[in-house]
Image: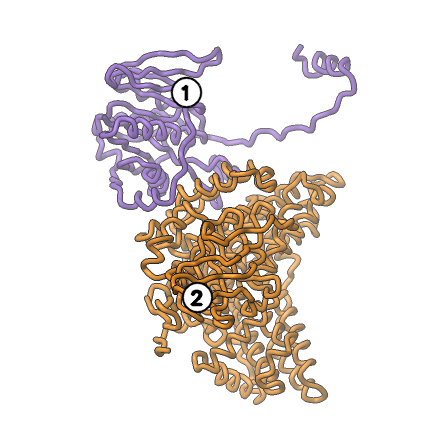
């Protein structure tokens, strides 16, 4: 068995994000980067499956500049067996990412793709769905419970929906996207980091894979969310009800 | 002792006082690889998930909790970083280890537990143990299966460590040493499995022993009620006819002093690293609060006096951090030569001994940096800082011990010129020649080269060159007056030490900034921090020099000498207010020290 896990390089969730004054984008100096937390959950799940099944391979892939090697090393340090970097200096939208991943999929022929439901930088929540459509395979999104069944030919997935957990079964290969509650990713142990240095990391370009990686969307403007106004203290329930009715107009 | 091989000038302990170092020869935090940073991040996440959420329970020493977290730290490799791979360690370089330890020490006393374990608890065995001893214990310590502790102090011997009274007598059958005595202030005592205990064989030869907690006659007292670092266990270790197998003697009979003092060098270095980690956390907390807290309708961070505090905290952290990473790599380089010193059997690495002076500088400087940073962080929090609602109060309590343990700062200050004098006497350090040369140069009134520099960093560096001369000049004057009794003139000796400390910190910051600038980075902030430090250090050094000279000379001689001080410390004051406001503004934008000094 082989599982393909895409890892996206995103600003660390604890980093203070500052928008560039002169155009769309964020200030990069002093910003720490991390593996997209949802992708880390996907990798953790893949590693747990590997620990259970034994003989198999977990391959991580990242798309971007040379700096993405850092996140691939994190993946290898967590326990992935092999890493691929598809090098591009372009900033890709979800569709372009899905195209590149589809090409990687065709090259690697994994049993399934396990990836974060969305990246915490652009929060698009599209790449996984698009990838499944391009490949013509099944998909299960927002997976918070995962079990391989019927001799590992199918995945039984618990999907987090607003109404509750929906359990579905998809035939493999498929694209599964992970939600927050699937697992808690392991630490990147120090011995793991040392072992990662010796694991294979292969670099290629979109052209090598036979795809053109270009975005069809363009970001024109970024804005910080408006600052929250200070709250007020109400003295009585009546006052609260009055404010909710007449000021906030929510009841 | 076999003659020591010659080392490159920048790798000789104390030599920064005599020679100038090329920026590219020093290691800086900017040189850390992504793997090294990743390891520090692992420690950071570990602290955030496993330690900080339980800080209250840890401080109340909930049974079993520290041990549980400690083992987990061991599984991640956080406890055996410096131990060779043959003994299940990771054999990591010191710069990597510093990065991890900064994180483990950022808040609360868990860092003390880890530091005492992997430093003074493990290193005596690692550096002085025989193969058999290491085979038996070292892997257990490196993996965290066992916890280590170091038992040197006694009720009557703290700073006077060798005045210890614990006795070790060979048993009649020659199979055991029988130890009797009580050790005080032993970190990790409650949980440690292996103690390195110092005792006098036949009442006179200080020797070290590896003592398992389960050996007959070994017990611990009750927990001390401490001001801070309540997470860590501190108890007496009581030895009543404790039976220690003869093969557990470490380094040979009478070799305890070599072990005790060389291990303290490493411990002092580690303490400095931990202190800087805690100072960074304290600054982060203070910055956040200063931005959130509004008074007079404005955030605190918009006020000049608060900006001054934040920038000064960052300045001090910057110089301390620069000195630590510089020294870490210097130590690694000397360890890498494989050279040993044969005072003990087996011989111990020269790397442990070479930078004793720099380790003391780092211990004194960083413990005081943390105290000041913690204090100002509390001050920024105002009344809230005085409550347990915010972490500022805890940091103040936890910080205070750093000036006391691993050799008080007073002992360490005396040690700095003392070590130079001892090395000079042994022909290991050309102190006398240097003092003679500088004194002659200064008395000749030969014009000091001001280099005609216009670059502010170069001007700052030139000032430090003069500050080195100042330290040597005062040492010469004091020695001329007091001879070998100089060490008794503690106030003068400490003043010399303080000038040397300012020089090492300042120079490390200047070289780091040069190096980053030469690499093409935007070093505006680094440069501001360096200049803010030196701009004030000039005044501090001048005052120290005046005090030391006034204590050693008088009349016209004093006047002439003070003239030399003025000449050496000539400096056009920079606008420190503007420098600090710039630093504070940037700090408030980015939120933390690492982000503040990040070079594009």
Give above or below for B435 relative to B364: below
- Quarter of the figure with residue A230: top right
Q: Identify the subunit bearing mark 1.
A: A
Q: Name the quadrant of the N terminus of chain B.
A: bottom left
Residue B199 in sight:
yes
Q: What element carries label 1?
A: strand
| Secondary structure beneath label 2 | strand
Q: In this view, does A206 lie to the left or right of B255?
A: left
Q: Position of residue B522 (x, y in %)?
A: 48, 54
**Front in this rendered view, residue A158 or B595:** A158
Disc nearest the viewer among 1 and 2: 2
Above or below, B485 against B267 in this view is below
Q: Mark 2 points at which residue?
A: B170
Q: What is the drawing colour of chain A?
A: purple
Position in image of residue B287 (x %, y %): 62, 45
Q: In the depicted view, which residue is nearer to us: A212 or B594?
A: B594
Residues packed near mark 2 inside 10 Å, few (<14), some (14 to 19) or many (20 plus): some
Q: Quick one: B558 or B175, which is closer to the camera?
A: B175
Task: Give the distance between the C-alpha atoms of the residues marked 1 and 2, in whole angstroms.
Answer: 65 Å
Question: Which chain contains the residue that carries disc 2?
Answer: B
Q: Mark 1 points at which residue?
A: A144
Residue that appears at 33% across and 15% down: A156
Q: Colour of chain B?
A: orange
* Residue B290 occupies quadrant: top right
Q: Above or below — where is B227 with respect to B334? A: above
Q: B209 or B271: which is nearer to us?
A: B209
Note whether residue B354 is visible: no
Q: Colour scheme used in the picture?
A: by chain
Q: Residue furthest right?
A: A235
Both labels 1 and 2 in a single chain = no
């Amino acid at each position: 068995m082989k599982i393909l896990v895409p890892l996206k390089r995103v600003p660390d969730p604890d980093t203070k994000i500052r928008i560039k004054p002169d155009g769309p984008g964020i200030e990069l100096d002093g910003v720490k980067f991390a593996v997209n937390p949802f992708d880390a959950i996907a990798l953790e799940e893949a590693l747990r499956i590997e620990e259970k099944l034994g003989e198999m391979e977990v391959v991580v892939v990242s798309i971007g500049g040379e700096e993405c090697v850092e996140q691939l090393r994190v993946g290898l340090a967590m326990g992935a067996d092999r890493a691929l970097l598809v090098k591009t200096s372009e900033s890709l939208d979800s569709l372009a990412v899905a195209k590149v991943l589809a090409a990687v999929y065709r090259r690697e022929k994994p049993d399934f793709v396990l990836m974060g439901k969305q990246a915490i930088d652009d929060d698009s929540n599209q790449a996984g769905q698009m990838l499944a459509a391009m490949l013509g395979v099944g998909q299960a999104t927002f997976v918070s419970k995962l079990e391989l069944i019927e001799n590992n030919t199918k995945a039984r997935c618990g999907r987090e929906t607003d109404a509750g957990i929906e359990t579905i079964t998809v035939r493999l290969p498929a694209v599964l996207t992970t939600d927050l509650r699937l697992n808690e990713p392991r630490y990147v142990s120090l011995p793991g980091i040392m072992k990662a240095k010796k694991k294979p990391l292969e670099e290629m370009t979109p052209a090598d894979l036979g795809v053109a990686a270009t975005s069809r969307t363009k970001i024109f403007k970024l804005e910080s969310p408006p600052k929250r106004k200070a709250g007020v203290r109400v003295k009585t329930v009546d006052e609260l009800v009055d404010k909710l009715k007449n000021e906030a107009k929510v009841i | 002792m076999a003659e020591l091989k010659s080392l490159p000038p920048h790798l000789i302990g104390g030599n920064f006082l005599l020679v100038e170092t090329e920026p590219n020869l020093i290691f800086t935090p900017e040189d850390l690889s992504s793997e090294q940073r990743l390891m520090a991040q692992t420690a950071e996440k570990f602290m955030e998930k496993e330690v900080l959420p339980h800080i209250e329970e840890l401080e109340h020493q909930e049974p079993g909790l520290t041990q549980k977290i400690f083992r987990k730290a061991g599984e991640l490799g956080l406890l055996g970083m410096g131990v060779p791979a043959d003994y299940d360690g990771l054999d990591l370089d010191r710069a990597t280890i510093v990065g991890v330890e900064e994180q483990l020490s950022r808040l609360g006393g868990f860092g003390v537990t880890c530091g005492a374990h992997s430093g003074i608890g493990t290193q005596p065995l690692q550096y002085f143990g025989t193969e058999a001893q290491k085979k038996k214990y070292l892997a257990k310590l490196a993996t965290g299966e066992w916890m280590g502790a170091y038992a040197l102090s006694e009720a009557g011997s703290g700073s006077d460590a060798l005045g210890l009274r614990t006795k070790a007598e060979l048993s009649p059958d020659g199979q055991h040493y029988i130890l009797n005595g009580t050790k005080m202030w032993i970190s990790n005592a409650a949980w440690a499995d292996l103690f390195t205990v110092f005792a006098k064989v036949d009442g006179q030869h200080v020797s070290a022993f590896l003592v398992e907690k389960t050996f007959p006659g070994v017990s611990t007292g009750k927990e001390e009620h401490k001001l801070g670092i309540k997470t860590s266990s501190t108890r007496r270790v009581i030895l009543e006819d404790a039976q220690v197998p003869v093969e557990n003697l470490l380094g040979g009979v009478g070799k305890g002093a070599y072990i005790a003092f060389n291990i303290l060098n490493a411990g002092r270095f580690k303490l400095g690293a931990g202190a800087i980690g805690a100072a960074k956390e304290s600054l982060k907390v203070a910055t956040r609060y200063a931005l959130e807290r509004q008074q007079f309708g404005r955030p605190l961070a918009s006020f000049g006096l608060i900006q001054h505090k934040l920038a000064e905290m960052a300045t001090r952290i910057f110089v301390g951090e620069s000195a630590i990473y510089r020294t870490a790599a210097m130590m690694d380089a000397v360890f890498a030569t494989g050279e040993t010193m044969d005072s003990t059997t087996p011989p111990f690495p020269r790397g442990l001994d070479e930078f004793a002076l720099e380790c003391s500088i780092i211990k004194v400087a960083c413990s005081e940096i943390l105290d000041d940073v913690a204090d100002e962080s509390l001050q920024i929090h105002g009344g809230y800082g005085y409550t347990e609602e915010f972490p500022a109060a805890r940091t103040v309590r936890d910080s205070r011990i750093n000036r006391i343990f691993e050799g008080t700062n007073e002992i360490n200050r005396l040690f700095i010129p003392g070590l130079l004098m001892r090395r000079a006497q042994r022909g290991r350090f050309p102190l006398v020649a240097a003092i003679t040369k500088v004194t002659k140069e200064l008395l000749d009134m030969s014009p000091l080269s001001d280099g005609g520099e216009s670059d502010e960093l170069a001007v700052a560096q030139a000032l430090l060159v003069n500050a080195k001369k100042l330290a040597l000049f005062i040492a010469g004057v004091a020695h001329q007056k007091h001879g070998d009794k100089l060490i008794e003139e503690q106030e003068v000796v400490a003043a010399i030490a303080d000038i040397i400390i300012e020089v090492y910190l300042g120079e490390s910051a200047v070289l780091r900034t040069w190096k980053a600038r030469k690499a093409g980075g935007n070093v505006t902030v680094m440069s501001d921090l360096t200049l803010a430090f030196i701009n004030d250090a000039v005044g501090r050094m001048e005052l120290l020099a005046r005090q030391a000279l006034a204590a050693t000379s008088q009349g016209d001689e004093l006047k002439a000498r003070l003239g030399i001080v003025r000449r050496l410390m000539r400096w056009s004051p920079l606008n420190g207010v503007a420098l600090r406001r710039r630093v504070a503004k940037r700090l408030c934008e980015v939120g933390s020290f690492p982000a503040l000094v990040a070079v594009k």
